[in-house]
Amino acid sequence: MPRDYWQQRNGQLDPEQDYLEIYRNLTQYEFPWETLQALSLALFRTFAVPSIGGLLDRTKEFHRHTQKRYDDTSLLLEQPTTHGFSSDEARDAIRRINQMHHAYDISNDDLRYVLSTFVVVPVRWIGQYGKRELDPGELTAVVRYYQEFGARLGIKDIPTDYPAFSALMDEYEVTHFVQTAPSHRVAESTLDLMVTFYPKPLASLVHLAARSVMDLPLSAALGYRPPPPLAARTVDASLRVRGVLLRLFPARQTPALVENYNRMRSYPGGFALRDLGTFPQTKSHR
């Protein structure tokens, strides 16, 4: 397959109608690793909002069952992309997400912000570290995909284009990022899990690299000191070189599915969507 196969394929599709296929091509064929890293960074951004980080800290799920929460989130989010929004798998996954959200008093503003991170953080990561930037049609497809996702989650006043999503995320962070102990605890639990995805001798380097891709407002809100400038420059340069080198490789022919990643450890014998996530008994107020 030619190196630009997926870019050519996406260029033949209508982003207003074929946004699911375009998004699938981007996240499972052309930029799967970039998407995974970016969505992990997006997760940390949500922790830095005290109302979100505080809720996650109080439930203790990110402390007691960090691996399962990571796996469940990844698996649930993947179902609409892989199977389509009208599939049984997507309906079951979205039903589970809604059941979890409705058990807590989560504001529409917080939900819109989380949705904006799913759109903006991967686009920015790919633009900075991918082998190419997204085309305008691909950008539209990403927005349309998450408009539908958000609508099925009952989120109101969803932005209609990428600049609006970008402005929403940036403005929300300016007004809501505050350093708190609960947010730091949730971030530390998640970082402790992520370093286990790599050989033990690399643990401290992985921790440093993860903090190096955080911008200063994010790291400050999570209670981290800025990494040494040399470390930050090295991580940035390494990621950029990786993107350049990827231009030499042929297009991926098989999808990279989250459920097949080695870091997914909670369900070695397979999983049932109805069993993923948490099952709180009563509605919790912040």
Image (tube, rainbow, N blue to C red):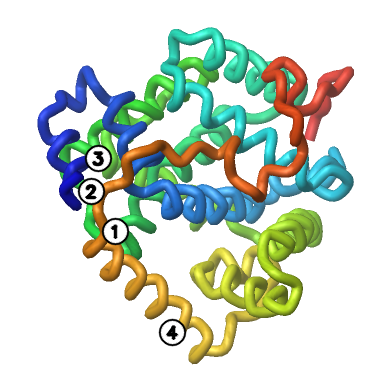
At horizontal 76% and vertical 62% (from top left) the residue drawn is: 192
User: Which residue does the numbered mark 3 point to in the structure image?
Assistant: 139
Q: Earlier in the sequence, mark 4 or mark 1?
A: 1
11 sits to left or right of 109: left
Q: Which of marks 3 and 4 is nearer the N terminus?
A: 3
Q: Do labels 1 and 2 touch, CB within 8 Å?
A: yes
Look at the numbered disc 3 and give the secondary structure of its residue: helix
Count every numbered label the image shows and give the total: 4
> Where does the image place residue 13, in percent across and percent down from the top left?
15, 26
Q: What element carries label 1?
A: helix
Label 4 sits on what residue type? Arg
Tell me if label 3 and label 2 are in contact, CB under 8 Å: yes
| Dot 3 amino acid type | Leu
Would you place residue 183 above or below residue 91 in this image? below
Q: In front here: 236 or 87? A: 87
The secondary element bearing badge 4 is classed as helix
Q: Mark 4 points at which residue?
A: 233
Q: Which of the labelled discs sits on residue 127, or is there none?
A: 1
| 8 w.r.t. 128: above or below | above
Q: Earlier in the sequence, mark 3 or mark 2?
A: 2
The image shows residue 32 at horizontal and vertical percentages of 42, 47
Q: Nearer the viewer, residue 211 or 28?
A: 28
Report which residue position mark 2 lands on. 134
Whether residue 241 is situated above or below residue 137 in the rendered picture: below
- Find numbered disc 2 in the image and state the secondary structure of the residue it sits on: loop
Query: What amino acid is found at the position of numbered circle 2 in the picture?
Result: Leu
Q: Which residue is drawn at 56% across and 14% down?
A: 89
